[in-house]
Image (tube, rainbow, N blue to C red):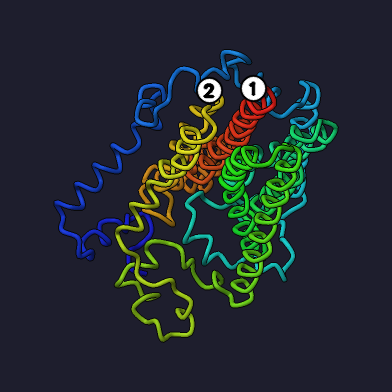
Amino acid sequence: MATPYWTSPYDELSKQSSTPLPLQRLFNCLVAVAYIPILCPLTTFGFFFAYDESFFDFDEVHSSNFLTLLRVTTGLSPFTLYVCGSLTASFYATLIWADVSAAKLGPFRWPIHWDTDNNACYDDMFCEPSRKHRLIRRPGNTLSNFFYLFFAIVVIASSVTRASFNEEKKMFILSDALFGIMLFILSISSTLWHACNCLWSHGIDLWSMEAVIFYLPVRMMSKGAYVILCNYIERNVMASRVVSASCLLIYLTHIILNGRNWMQKHNDQFWHNHCPLAVRNRLPNSPYVHNASDTSNKMSLGPIALYEVYLFALLPVIHNAPSWILAACIFESFGSLCLARILNVSLTVGWVYRMTERWAFDACRHMLLISEKIESAESRGEGLKAFIWRTLAATLSPTAALHYCTGVTIIAAFCHSRSVEMTMLQKILEV
């Protein structure tokens, strides 16, 4: 291992990079400055994209309350949302009950053929302390998938409800339903991966995660294509069908091809001996890079470059660019400003904190302190203190925080996309 756990590999990466140190510091400052536009009200920077006040009137017409906007954009009643929340809570409550019940019966073991005792990849990625011989080994990383499951049910329910709308208003319902299914698969596979780190679930987790990330930009660009087609096709219904089918085809193709890719990686045991994605395993002096001829290292991604770090850190900023440009050039509306603020802030907070996780820069020294407190309390038989420290570890786990924040981000991003769509359709149908 190039750098031991609880030691940030960024210092080592910085030293080994050919980029001069003053230039590295400049890049670090530029990354920090780039976050300002997405953390501040967009109206402050709207003049850069030629936005005027009419671009932000969605909230004035409907509401600036998140729950109201959730109902308006999904088309679901408060009772339906309550049922979605109840189903999700019931699932995780049952999981907690099973964990407690199994503990009373003695040490719990997952199926042996799941190879859950192989912690090599998991330990390279995450720092939440593990509970041995429990159904839920890492409560924070496991139970924080609540938001993913909740919104998966919401999206599927919304797609079913919108099926009774007219042709234009039910645009994208098939691809939205598929998105909801992939989000459902993500919630279950991520729950399993963090509960017991069974290696077969890791590939499904990564596959469904990339499918969820991929969909909303494609949906946004498809709406742009719809507006353009409406200028050339007299029948808006035909334009709606074309872009809906195209969006579904593109998304389905991505799911199939990417699924084959991750299945091949699983068959090749890509993550069985270490985590090839971890920064410390991609340092130029890492044994997984240095001894590339070794059988266990043949699937290494190669040495990491500093520019990859900066691009990865800027992802919350970069993901905004397409929607901002489309709003200025095609939609002439930014949709709900409230939802945009929520998704940007939640994504930024979750993303920045997650970069302190072990697979990235391993800067969570407070998690080491908590782990030591847990071990000390358990060694002295202080069950209550151990439980309190484990609860704190679960709450402060960077991956759990990412699940909380990106769960809110996905909800807000989908509803924001729907708010743009609703405004766009209203303008087109009025012409």
Which residue type carries mark 2? Cys
Q: Which mark is residue 69?
A: 1
- Please tell me whether residue 276 is drawn above or below residue 214 in the rendered image: below
Give SS at disc 1.
helix
Specify whether residue 147 is in view: yes
Figure quadrant of the C terminus: top right
Residue at point 56%, 44% (across, down): 381
Q: Which mark is residue 338?
A: 2
* Closer to the camera in the image, 61 or 125: 61
Image quarter for residue 66? top right
| Residue at the (63%, 56%) spot, across then down | 205
Residue 276, x across and y down, in percent: 47, 68
Residue type at mark 1: give it. Leu
State the image coordinates of residue 159 (x, y, percent, origin top left): 77, 38
Q: Nearer the viewer, residue 335 or 314?
A: 335
Q: Quadrant of the N terminus?
A: bottom left
Residue 35 shows which numbered tag?
A: none
From the viewer's perspective, is 307 left or right of 85? left
**Residues packed near mark 2 inside 10 Å, few (<14), some (14 to 19) or many (20 plus):** some
Farthest residue to the right: give it: 164
Kindly tell me whether residue 103 is visible in this rendering.
no
Horizontal arrangement in the rendering, residue 75 relative to residue 127 (left or right): right
Judging depth in this view, the residue of 138 and 359 nearest the camera is: 359
Image coords of residue 48 (percent x, y): 35, 30
Residue 194 image position (x, y, % from top left): 61, 53
Mark 2 vs 1, N-terminal side = 1
Query: Image point 68% across, 52% down: which residue?
Result: 246
How far apart are the alpha carbons under marks 2 and 1?
Answer: 9 Å
Name which residue lies at 68% across and 46% down. Answer: 243
Q: Secondary structure at mark 2?
A: helix
Whether residues under marks 2 and 1 lie with C-beta atoms below 8 angstroms apart, the answer is yes
